[in-house]
Image (cartoon, rainbow, N blue to C red):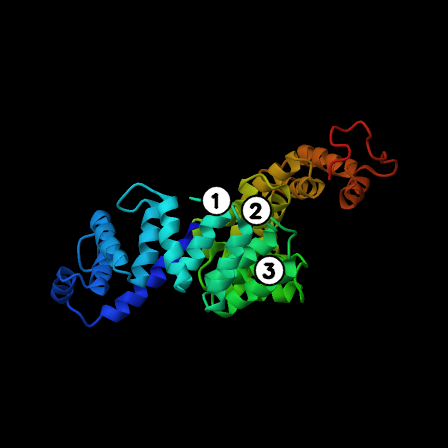
Amino acid sequence: MLTRTVAAVLIAAASLTAAAQDASLDELLARASKRDAEAEYALGMMAYEGRGVPRDPGQALRLVERAAKHGQLEALNALGFFLQHGIGTAADPARAREWYETAAARGHAGAQVNLGWLYEHGLGTERAPAIALEWYRKAAAQGLAEGDFNAASLLEAGAGAPPDLAGAAAAYARAAQKNFAPASHRLGRLLEQGQAPGGEYGSALARYQAAARAGLPEAQFDAARLLLAAGDAQDALDWLQKAAQRNYPPAQALLDDPETQYRMASLLDKSSAVAWLRKAAAQGHVKAQLALGIALEEGRGTAPDPAAAASWYEKAGGAGDADALYRLALLLDEGTGVARDTVRARDLLARAAALGHEAARERMARLLGPGLPQQDTGSPFKGLR
C-alpha cells in the first residue's frame, strides 16, 4: 500500500523535472543561491533520487524544506512525504500531515492522496476513513488514478461504513481507464467473485491480463489461474513463469505443486508433457508416475525406455495403483526392459486383479483357468485406487 504514496511524490518530481529540464546544474545552483524555490525543489529532488548529483537524503530534505517554506507547491507535498517516511530525518507523520494539508488545500492532487492515506490509517492524526475518502475523491476529480484507486479500496472494505461494491467497481474502472494496473487487477477480482456488474470469466480475465501486461505479478498469477482452469495451459504457464520471475511466492508455489504439474502435462503437447510429468512424479504424484511410465514405455514425447518405465510403474504400484501393477507385470512377464520374472509377474497380476483391474483379472483367468477367486477382501490393497 506504500506504493500509492510513493507514486504521488514521484508524480510531483516528474512535473518539476519537466519545468527545469532546460536548466543546467550550474544554473540551478545559481538560482537556488538566490532562494529560487523552483530551483531549490529541483535540486532537492535530484539529491533525493541521486540524479545528476550524489544521492543525499539530508541535503534533499533541506532543499525541499526551503522551497516549501517559500510556498513552492510541489515542495509542500514532497516535504510532507519526506517527513512521513523519515527521509533525511526521523519520521514525523503529524508534521507531514500539516504540509500535506497546505498543499492539498491549494489543490495538489498528490498531496490530497497522501493526506487521505494518513487519515485512512490514523498516521499523525486520528483514523478517519470518511475524511480520507473525501480527499481521495478530490484527487480523483483532478484525474489522478491513485485517488480513484484508494477511494475504491475504502469503498470495497467498507471502512467506517457498509461496503459499497458497486461504487468500488466504478472507481476501479475509472482508475483502470487511466492505465493504473492495480485497479485493473482489483476490478478483475470483483468481477470474478460476481461482486461487480458484468462479472464473468471473460471480463475478469481481460482485467487480469491488462494488469498482467503492465507487469503486476499478482495479476499475472490470477490470469494464469483462470487460464489453467479453462484448459489454456500454455498461456497460463507463460504468466505463471513471469510472476515467478518477479519473485511472487504464490506463482512459484503453483509451479512447484505436483497436482498443477500433472494438470499441465495433461494439457500441453507430448514433449512438454513429459517434462511436467517428471516434475510431478519426482514429488510422488502417483498418477504422474503411471503416466510417465506409459510415456516412457510407448515413446510418447520421448525416446522409448521400458526400463525407466518399469521403475516408475514400481513406484506407482507401491502406492496401490492397479494399472501400474498390471503394466509392470506385463513387462516382467515378457522380459521387456527388465529381467523376465514370470513368478513375480503373476503376483503383481493377482494384486492388480484384487484391486478390481479387469484386464488383470482376465489375464489371470487365462493363466489359471476356471475358478479364479473373486476380489481378495483380505488384501492389504483393499479399497486403493
Q: How far apart, in angstroms, are the residues tagged by discs 2 and 3? A: 59 Å
Depth check, mark 2 against mark 3: the one in front is: 3
At x 22%, y 51%, the residue is 62
Residue 378: image x %, image y %? 80, 27
Determine which residue is flagged by label 2. 306
Residue 1: image x %, image y %? 46, 50
At x 18%, y 53%, the residue is 54
Q: Dividing the picture into quarters, in which one does residue 360 lie?
A: top right
Q: Is residue 352 left or right of residue 283?
A: right
* Mark number, residue 328: none
Which of pointers 3 and 1 lies earlier in the amino acid sequence?
A: 1
Amino acid type, residue under disc 2 in the picture? Pro
Tally of numbered discs: 3
Q: Secondary structure at mark 1?
A: loop
Residue 224: image x %, image y %? 55, 57
Q: Secondary structure at mark 2?
A: helix
Residue 228: image x %, image y %? 60, 57
Q: Is residue 75 left or right of residue 106?
A: left
Determine which residue is flagged by label 1. 122
Which of pointers 2 and 3 lies earlier in the amino acid sequence?
A: 3
Q: Is residue 72 left or right of residue 124?
A: left
| CB-based contact (under 8 Å), mark 2 and mark 3 | no
Amino acid type, residue under disc 3 in the picture? Ala
Determine which residue is flagged by label 3. 168
View extreme (right): residue: 371
